[in-house]
Amino acid sequence: MQNEPFPFRPGQSLLRLKDILFILGRYGFGEVLENLPLPKRVKPKCVECPESPRLALWTKIRRALEELGPTFIKVGQILSVRPDLVPMELCDELKHLQEDVPPEKFEDIAARVEGSLGGGLDTLFAEFSREPLAAASLSQVHRARTHDGRDVAVKVLRPKARSTVAADMDIMEYLAGLIHSRMESLKPAHLPDIASEVRKGLQREMDFLSEARNQMLFTSRFGPEQGVMAPEVIEELTTPDVLVMEYVEAVRLDEYQGPDEKRRQLAQIGLDCVAAQMLDHGFFHADPHLGNLGVNRDGLLVFFDWGMVGRLTPDMRSALVDYLIAMVQGDAEAIARTALEMSVEVPTDLDFQRFLRDVMYYLDKVRTPVAGHANMGRFLLDLTAACREFGVYLRSDYILMARALLSTEAAGRTIDPDFSALDGLKSLAIRHVVKRASMVFSDRPPWRRAEREIRRLGRLPARVEGVLQRLEKGELRLHVQQDFLKDQMEYLRGIAFVIASSLVVASLVIGSSLIYVSDVAPHLWGVPILGLTGFVLSGLFGAWLVWRLLFRKR
């Protein structure tokens, strides 16, 4: 197998690749690595750690990501909310990722803030804490005070975060491409697509202007009147590397000790807020887990960390309303058809009845729970997994929506054990049913659909004309994809090699026989040396050919 060149500059990247391969080998992935055409100088001696054989596959992946460092931990956190990209079991395992990242030196953080904001730390802030409030894989947060007396939290991107992430993602995409091209069994996983999607997510999370914009968008639409808030962004002190926002004293939601009635209110407020973000505004916090939710002194629910958000177009919101109504009504067929409408791609040979049967199974689980309350968010994620099994891939923002609802429901149950998202959304579904009946306020008025169909019909002549023009110019192409063509060619090459080798062996035997019979000099013990040599070579060559046919890799 020919080694493919390492497509990056030598030095640190090469050493980092070697470290990554060594850690993967420690957790039992050495067999996969041995089948890849890696450069010889980076191929590690895969020594599996003693505990690896006892671990489940998903646990091995999580442990390997933790050992690989901050970038890979962040990759795992992103994948933990993307069951459209990885199996549900892996998503659940990745939620247990442990971040043990030491904080950066204060001098490096100060230099980053000063370089980004264009001034000295004393000029920018009246006070700036040397010890961070929190340290994550890509950033850390310090408390500070502005010269006008405002207490603020300063979120700073780690100095080498971008270069480290870029180098690690280059290696990840390189390995994903090799595995995808060389291992047929892993092709359905679409590893290069996953690596590309993860890179995009990391780039967005490292842009603090984008996070500030998301936070400001939320505060412009929601506030104390809805019982919620987000820290106010200090715009003049915010850059792509530094985010300065109002410092909010808040108790984590799972540590809140308020009265039972207030806890029930907070659970419902959180659900109403997330549902309004999705259905009314098409913009929502995609990761409202317990670490990103708190309760401030005024009893408001605080949403932190707006680095990951989802967006829904008007059509996507209408499909979500259909989905919600069908769930409340228990209409499995409507849920199945709406799921197909929400997807990017639907196989032409989809067995709809089998798909519907699986939807009915998951719907029965949520409507008739054996113990406890119905888990609506889990139903949405189970449905996502069912879609993947049938080759139906939902749009990524729908997946983020499902994960956000699951996190919201889990957070609600933390402060109110009797909380049920399905019950809480029934009134919302009724409101949208009534809204649908109105010709004025409906999200799907009949004239809108008619207008779209007329526009689509109007574009038809132009598209037909374009096809005819290509046909006249001889530019019309027909794409035909033949499955397993590469395997068939490899098989034919193997047959050709065996035939050619057999002919060579036969020629040697015949030639040696002629020389032997002709008694051509020189001789050794009365035997022609050239004939004897030919017999020996043909015998060795023939034995090697037989050995290769019997023991070659299939």
Image (cartoon, grey):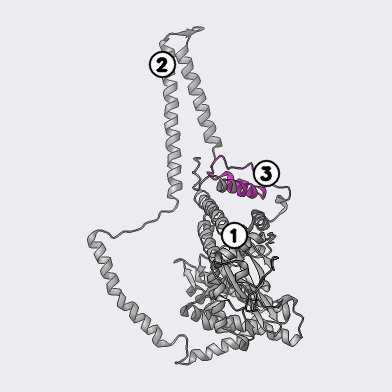
- Which mark, residue 222? none
| Amino acid tagged 2 | Leu
Residue neighbourhood size for the residue with mark 2, other residues' Cα within 10 Å, grouped as few (<14), some (14–19), many (≥20): few
Separation of marks 2 and 1 at Cα, in angstroms: 78 Å
41 to the left or right of 126: left
Could you say where residue 486 lies in the image, as x and y percent from the top left? 44, 48
| Amino acid tagged 1 | Pro
- In the depicted view, which residue is nearer to us: 7 or 518? 7
Separation of marks 2 and 3 at Cα, in angstroms: 55 Å
Of marks 1 and 3, the one in the foreground: 1
Of marks 2 and 3, the one in the foreground: 3
> Farthest top residue?
526
Could you say where residue 250 lies in the image, as x and y percent from the top left? 70, 78
- Which mark, residue 514? 2
The picture quadrant where one finds residue 151 is bottom right
- Which mark, residue 47? 3
Q: Are marks 2 and 3 in contact (CB under 8 Å)?
A: no
| Amino acid tagged 3 | Val
Disc on the earlier residue, 2 or 3: 3
**Can see residue 372?**
no
**For residue 245, above or below residue 10:** below
